[in-house]
């Protein structure tokens, strides 16, 4: 259940990005920074049940990092197997979804970081 919620949150954000970034030309670092700043204006934002998007940040190296907080985490929900499944689903979605095509085309590295309510990192996935 938790994996599905997290993947749903990523899909929702990706669809929004798809419509924001439908330009046919190359994405510049400045455009990436502007996009992240624009997305962060609406944060923190609940994107799925128990998942909050806290901010989106652009890196100097043409990267984009999504920072999420999992608001309620059952102790057994995030075992190693579930975390590995989550990571695999996020990577697959990045590599195959139309909404991430502009990032793949422009060699933008996308990083998803999930933390618990105490700020402890639960999962970090780098997609490129």
Image (cartoon, helix red, strand yellow):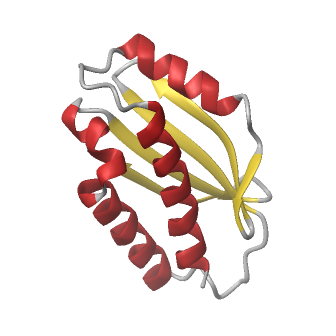
Q: Residue placed at 74% from the left, 38% from the top?
A: 43
- In the shown orientation, is residue 76 left or right of residue 22? right
Q: Decide: is 43 above or below 74.
A: above
Q: Residue placed at 34% from the left, 22% from the top?
A: 61
Q: Residue placed at 46% from the left, 49% from the top?
A: 14
Say whether residue 76 is visible. yes
- In the shown orientation, is residue 61 left or right of residue 66? left
Quadrant location of the N terminus in the rendered image: bottom right
Q: Decide: is 81 above or below 39.
A: below
Q: Residue placed at 39% from the left, 42% from the top?
A: 110
Say whether residue 127 is visible. no
- In the shown orientation, is residue 92 left or right of residue 15? left
Quadrant of res 60: top left
Instruction: State the image coordinates of residue 33 (x, y, percent, origin top left).
Output: 50, 18
- In the shown orientation, is residue 90 left or right of residue 67? left
Closest to the observer, 17 or 50: 17
Q: How many marks?
A: 0
Residue located farthest toward the top when viewing the structure as drawn: 30
Closest to the observer, 110 or 25: 25
Quadrant location of the C terminus in the rendered image: top left
Instruction: State the image coordinates of residue 11 (x, y, percent, origin top left).
Output: 48, 59
């Amino acid at each position: 259940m938790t994996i599905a919620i997290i993947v749903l949150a990523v899909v929702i954000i990706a669809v929004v990005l798809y419509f924001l970034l439908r330009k046919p030309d190359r994405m510049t670092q400045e455009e990436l920074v502007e996009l992240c700043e624009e997305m962060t204006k609406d944060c923190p934002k609940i994107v799925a049940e128990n998942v909050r998007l806290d901010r989106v940040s652009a890196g100097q190296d043409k990267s984009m990092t999504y920072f999420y907080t999992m608001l309620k985490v059952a102790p057994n929900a995030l075992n190693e197997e579930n975390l590995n499944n989550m990571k695999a689903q996020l990577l697959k979605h990045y590599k195959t979804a139309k909404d991430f095509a502009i990032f793949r085309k422009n060699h933008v590295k996308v990083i998803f970081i999930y933390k618990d309510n105490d700020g402890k990192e639960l999962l970090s996935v780098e997609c490129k």
